[in-house]
């Protein structure tokens, strides 16, 4: 066909051009600005192809007049869409010729089909959207698919309940996709054009979208042209790096459109990341490889294009990076037509995110005709900014000084002996006039306590001095500026530095919870039991000159009485654990509930409990314990992962058992029988310890210990009459058993239970964690700077409405952690959020800040 176009180019110039440009295999998609132009295209193309024996058929057009001369057999057979309109299929796209709109059909899965990773991938693959017109919907679906992938599910494994409900909600939303329509004609006829591309990124995805703006007869019209999106990689990247990836994707998309030569116009690239915009303007060789490669690619692909700053609320790519539902997309003018300023004059476009605004103001104020900014302009612009701030915050003090009077004694700067310099700046008078310091250090500029510029200056010095602490940082700052509030003001700003927080994170604290019901109500000993392992220990091998053999102690502790039962376990196997559990049940009782650590609490390969972790994580072990508990009607509960403080009861028992073991054995090596005897002795000692502090009064009764409750009959078998008020000598034998039992539990209520009233620590709620907060997850085997980042997706509250467990979304999936293991990052960096977008930062220092190597 191309050879035919070359051969007949002189006879059919228009047809030859169309044949080379607008054919996709055997499909022709073309158009023109008038009916006559399209008729000429149809005529020349038909005659040209007939020269080679090719006949064009299945004609279809948005204008019925063009089909009047086409025989019915050569016209396209129209299909019926969901709403009853006539449609045609064009390269996989659904086109309604009557309204000249592109539609999207979606066939949902059968209700009886199984929801698994395979079926979900099949469903998402049914979307065909080469232009990315419904990109936010597909982006949301891909983000969901990545969540499933992080769960490490098999292809045909059923979804967890939370993901299953989310998928059903997505499928219900997919049913609204046929209601979305996009006009095929994106431009006005006989107009001037502009191409505007937007990029954005979130922690889940990044993307870019393009809009064509046509200007005709003084009217601007913006229309979505195409988009592309990518889910964020599983390897965690910082948001600026993801924003850079989005900008790189935008550069590729803009370059592809430019290469098509459909529009001979200006190209504008927009991003809401001031960091990325500064990187793109910089030299790539100054950055690390990841950043440098993408900056170089962007600069090469967008050569001749203009990069500009757009606020996030006006950025349509934000919808693409976060995903959207069908209903949201139907009602989104921002996605269909872009931000409103595209249809307006350039004077109404967002101002660039510049830090040198007051340098330009100084030039304008003094009518300096200079090309660009000079260092002197920036310095004087900075003084202009500081003078403006001082006039706002120290108005009364300036009036007094200008009138030749001293500042009032009640003024916050009275101790500084302030004066006004030749530039109109309020400076510290102080007592260092005769020192060898320069003028800036002798008389630093006074800064207000809480102002974005003050915070920006402090943060700049903080970074320039390699994240110095508040005391040394204040000393550096006072060589040039004097912030009111001193160290307190500096500390407040430094506390919001994310890098410093990550180097020395602070764990979240919540108030200590009320004791659970099983701890404060009387019950038969070991009815509710906690279990843990202790060890490893070693015993002597029966064969001479052989290495000692490892063993462990399985500790059972009663929730109500703190009574313990110790079982020696010869090895780490499911059989040995179940045998220890059976011996405990036969010796003591069959508990109704057993609590234990989650397997992930045995952290790290370097930990001595690594073998125990492997045992508890094995599927065979979990299944065997589960079947044993079902057969014996025992409920087994786990505390949250990596939260040993939830199991403080058995952790204290482990500590006590180790204490007695190491002090009695020392460096000796016992045989197995001797070790088992010692374990029984240790259990007896632990059960003989007092439940509350001893009294100095010799008339007091014997102290109450856990041993008093071991072996007593269950109090819930039937209701016993109160015999504690009857003379003991008058009681029968069976009544005396009840007497001892009742007197023990009476003392348990009166003497022991009240000692649990106070909170030994975590007495106040110091921090309230919120959904969507970014936190560091403490990992005992990693330094703080390598602790993983996570986003809080759900908080699990106790009966006192205090959240102590959080559901987190990490780079590797969804996990649960105790809030005491989380370090909430500062929710908002006030310095960055207030100084960067407005362009009101410290101008002199921005040049140094821009030359710093990014991290």
Image: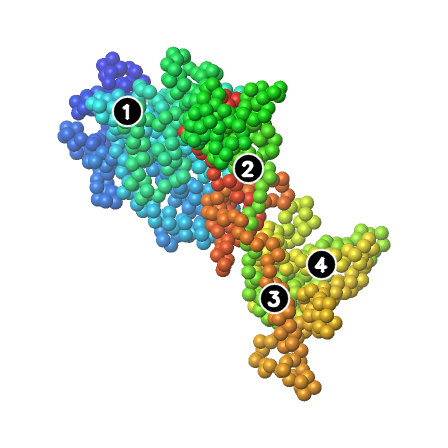
The span from disc 3 to disc 1 (Cα, nearest Å) is: 76 Å
Tell me if residue 824 can be seen: yes
- The residue carrying pointer 2 sits among few (fewer than 14), some (14 to 19) or many (20 or more) residues within 10 Å by Cα, namely some
Q: Nearer the viewer, residue 314 or 135?
A: 314
The image position of residue 767, as x and y in percent, is 52, 48
Residue 478 lies in quadrant: top right
- The residue carrying pointer 3 sits among few (fewer than 14), some (14 to 19) or many (20 or more) residues within 10 Å by Cα, namely few
The span from disc 2 to disc 4 (Cα, nearest Å) is: 44 Å
Foreground label between 3 and 4:
3
Q: What residue do we see at 59% from left, 24% from top?
A: 432
The image position of residue 641, as x and y in percent, is 57, 52
In the rendered image, the vertical position of residue 595 relative to residue 795, given as above or below: below
Q: Which residue is mark 3?
A: 754
Going from N to C along the chain, the mark reached first, 1 or 2, is 1
Q: Nearer the viewer, residue 790 or 57?
A: 790
Going from N to C along the chain, the mark reached first, 3 or 4, is 4
Going from N to C along the chain, the mark reached first, 4 or 1, is 1
In the rendered image, the vertical position of residue 159 relative to residue 245, given as above or below: below
Q: Which residue is mark 4?
A: 656
Q: Which residue is mark 2?
A: 488
The secondary element bearing badge 1 is classed as loop
Q: Is label 1 in contact with label 2 (beta carbons under 8 Å)? A: no
The span from disc 1 to disc 2 (Cα, nearest Å) is: 47 Å
């Amino acid at each position: 066909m191309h050879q035919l176009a070359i051969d007949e180019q002189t006879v059919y110039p228009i047809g030859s051009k169309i044949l080379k440009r607008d054919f996709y295999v055997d499909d022709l998609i073309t158009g023109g600005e008038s009916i006559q132009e399209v008729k000429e295209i149809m005529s020349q193309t038909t005659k040209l192809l007939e020269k080679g024996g090719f006949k064009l058929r299945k004609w279809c057009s948005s204008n019925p007049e063009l089909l009047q001369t086409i025989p019915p057999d050569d016209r396209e057979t129209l299909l019926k869409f969901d709403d009853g309109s006539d449609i045609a299929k064009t390269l996989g796209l659904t086109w309604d010729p009557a309204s000249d709109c592109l539609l999207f059909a979606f066939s949902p899965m059968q209700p009886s089909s199984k929801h698994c990773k395979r079926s979900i991938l099949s469903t998402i693959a049914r979307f065909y959207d080469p232009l990315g017109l419904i990109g936010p919907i597909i982006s949301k679906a891909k983000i969901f698919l990545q969540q499933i992938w992080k769960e490490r599910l098999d292809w045909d494994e059923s979804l967890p309940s939370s993901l299953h409900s989310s998928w059903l909600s997505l499928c219900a939303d997919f049913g609204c996709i046929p209601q979305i329509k996009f006009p095929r004609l994106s431009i006005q006829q006989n107009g001037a054009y502009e191409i505007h591309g937007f990029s954005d990124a979130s922690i889940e995805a990044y993307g870019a979208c393009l809009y064509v703006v046509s200007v005709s007869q003084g009217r601007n019209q913006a229309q979505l042209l195409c988009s592309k999106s990518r889910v964020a990689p599983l390897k965690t990247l910082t948001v600026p790096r993801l924003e850079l990836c989005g900008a790189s994707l935008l550069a590729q998309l803009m370059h592809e459109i430019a290469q098509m030569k459909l529009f001979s116009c200006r190209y504008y690239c927009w991003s809401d990341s001031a960091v990325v915009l500064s990187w793109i303007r910089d030299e790539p060789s100054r950055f690390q490889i990841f950043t440098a490669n993408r900056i170089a690619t962007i600069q090469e692909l967008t050569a001749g294009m203009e990069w500009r700053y757009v606020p996030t609320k006006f950025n349509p790519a934000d919808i693409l990076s976060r995903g959207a539902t069908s209903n949201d997309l139907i009602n989104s003018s921002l996605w269909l037509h872009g931000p409103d300023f595209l249809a307006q004059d350039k004077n109404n476009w967002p101002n660039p995110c510049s830090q040198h605004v007051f340098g330009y103001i100084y030039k304008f104020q003094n009518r300096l005709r200079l090309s660009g900014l000079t260092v002197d302009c920036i310095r004087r612009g900075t003084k202009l900014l500081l003078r403006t701030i001082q006039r706002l915050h120290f108005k009364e003090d300036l009036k007094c000084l200008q009138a030749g009077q001293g500042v009032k004694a009640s003024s916050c700067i009275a101790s500084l002996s302030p004066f006004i310099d030749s530039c109109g700046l309020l400076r510290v008078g102080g007592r260092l006039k005769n020192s060898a310091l320069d003028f800036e250090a002798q008389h630093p500029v006074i800064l207000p306590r809480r102002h974005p510029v003050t915070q920006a200056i402090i943060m700049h010095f903080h970074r320039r001095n390699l994240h110095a602490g508040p005391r040394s940082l204040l000393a550096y700052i006072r060589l040039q500026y004097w912030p009111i509030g001193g160290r307190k003001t500096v500390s407040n700003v430094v506390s919001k530095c994310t890098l410093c927080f990550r180097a020395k994170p602070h764990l979240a604290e919540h108030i200590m919870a009320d004791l659970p019901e099983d701890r404060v109500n009387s019950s038969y000993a070991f009815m509710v039991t906690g279990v843990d392992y202790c060890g490893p220990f070693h015993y002597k091998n029966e064969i001479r000159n052989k290495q000692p053999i490892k063993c462990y102690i399985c500790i059972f502790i009663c929730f109500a009485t703190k009574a313990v039962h110790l079982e020696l376990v010869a090895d780490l196997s499911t059989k040995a654990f179940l045998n220890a559990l059976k011996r405990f049940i036969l010796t003591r009782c069959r508990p109704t509930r057993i609590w234990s650590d989650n397997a992930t609490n045995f952290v790290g390969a370097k930990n001595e409990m690594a073998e125990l972790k492997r045992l508890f994580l094995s599927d065979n072990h979990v299944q065997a314990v589960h079947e044993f508990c079902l057969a014996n009607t025992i409920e087994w509960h786990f505390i949250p992962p990596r939260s040993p403080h939830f199991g403080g009861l058995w952790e204290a028992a482990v500590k006590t058992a180790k204490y007695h073991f190491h002090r009695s054995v020392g460096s000796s090596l016992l045989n197995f029988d001797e070790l088992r005897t010692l374990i029984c002795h240790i259990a007896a000692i632990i059960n003989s310890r007092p439940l509350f502090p001893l009294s100095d009064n010799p008339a007091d009764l014997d102290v109450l210990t856990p041993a008093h409750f071991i072996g007593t009959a269950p109090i819930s078998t039937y209701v016993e009459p109160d015999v504690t008020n009857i003379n003991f000598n008058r009681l029968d034998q069976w009544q005396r058993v009840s007497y001892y039992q009742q007197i023990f539990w009476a003392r348990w209520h009166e003497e022991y239970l009240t000692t649990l009233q106070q909170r030994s620590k975590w007495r106040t709620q110091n921090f309230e964690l919120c959904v969507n907060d970014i936190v560091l997850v403490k990992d005992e085997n990693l330094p703080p700077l390598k602790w993983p980042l996570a986003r809080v997706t759900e908080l699990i509250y106790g009966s006192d409405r205090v959240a102590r467990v959080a559901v987190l979304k990490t780079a590797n999936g969804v996990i649960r952690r105790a809030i005491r293991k989380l370090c909430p990052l500062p929710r908002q960096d006030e310095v960055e959020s207030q100084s960067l977008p407005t362009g009101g930062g410290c101008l002199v220092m921005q040049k140094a800040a821009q030359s710093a190597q990014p991290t």
